Amino acid sequence: MPTTEWARASFTASLLTFQGGITVPGYAASKGAIGQLTMAPSNEWASKGVQVNAIALGYIATDNTQALQDNPERSASIIGRIPAGRWGQPEDFKGPTVLLASSAADCVSGVVLLVDGGWMGGSLLFPPLSSLGRYLLGLLHFIGGSLASYPLPLSLRIDQDGHSTH
């Protein structure tokens, strides 16, 4: 158990912390685990002065993504989904990294900070909603809230009897 007066731990997550990905189930599973590994210790250690957070990378122009960048169709498809209209650069993480390591983040813990050019917000039918927001809207739909007749952008719907519909 941590015993220092304060400490910071920051993990590297990715968009696949929140999305399944294509042809990379192991990578997606490991990044999903990073999200949980960020939140679970935060619950236990925040009271002891330890902040645990993560930075979720979007599509970043590095050697690892060079093949995607060099594929005109795939690169255009990716950039078309990024509201910022560009690949991220390693320099884009300077500010968020300093923030999470500084006293400005003394009350920030258990957060997976997206640095993705707006991918997660801009790629949804309801741009301001996160995955959590879509889940909550789906839950309202399920319990018969005021949105019961509103078509939700969910890949799986649950009717009022608890059965999945497509």
Image: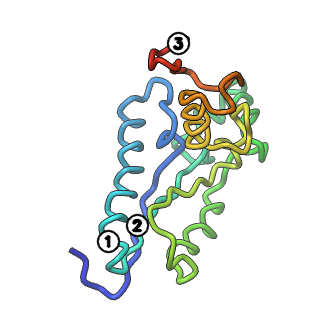
Q: Where is residue 92 in the image (x, y as percent from the top left)?
A: 65, 60
Q: Is residue 22 above or below residue 132?
A: above
Helix, strand or loop under label 3: strand
Q: Residues within 10 Å of mark 2 (few under 14, many from 20)?
A: many
> Which quarter of the picture shows residue 70?
top right
Residue density around tag 3, few if under 14, some if 14–19, many if 20 or more, within 10 Å: few
Q: Residue at x 45, y 23 (%)?
A: 23
Q: In this view, does 86 lie above or below 141?
A: below
Q: In which quarter of the image is the N terminus?
A: bottom left
Q: Which amino acid does label 2 sit on?
A: Val
Q: Which amino acid does label 3 sit on?
A: Thr
Residue tagged by mark 2? 52
Residue under circle 1?
Answer: 45
Q: As rendered, which of 42 and 162 lies closer to the eye?
A: 162
Residue at x-position 37% and y-position 37%: 29
Q: Which secondary structure, mark 2?
A: strand
Q: Mark 3 points at which residue?
A: 165
How many dots with numbers?
Answer: 3
User: Of 89 and 154, which appears nearest the observer?
Assistant: 154
Q: How far apart are marks 2 and 1 (CA)?
A: 8 Å
Q: Is residue 51 above or below residue 3?
A: above
* Label 2–label 3 contact, CB within 8 A: no
Q: Say whether residue 164 is left or right of residue 119.
A: left
Q: Earlier in the sequence, mark 2 or mark 3?
A: 2
Percent of width and height locating residue 7: 37, 79
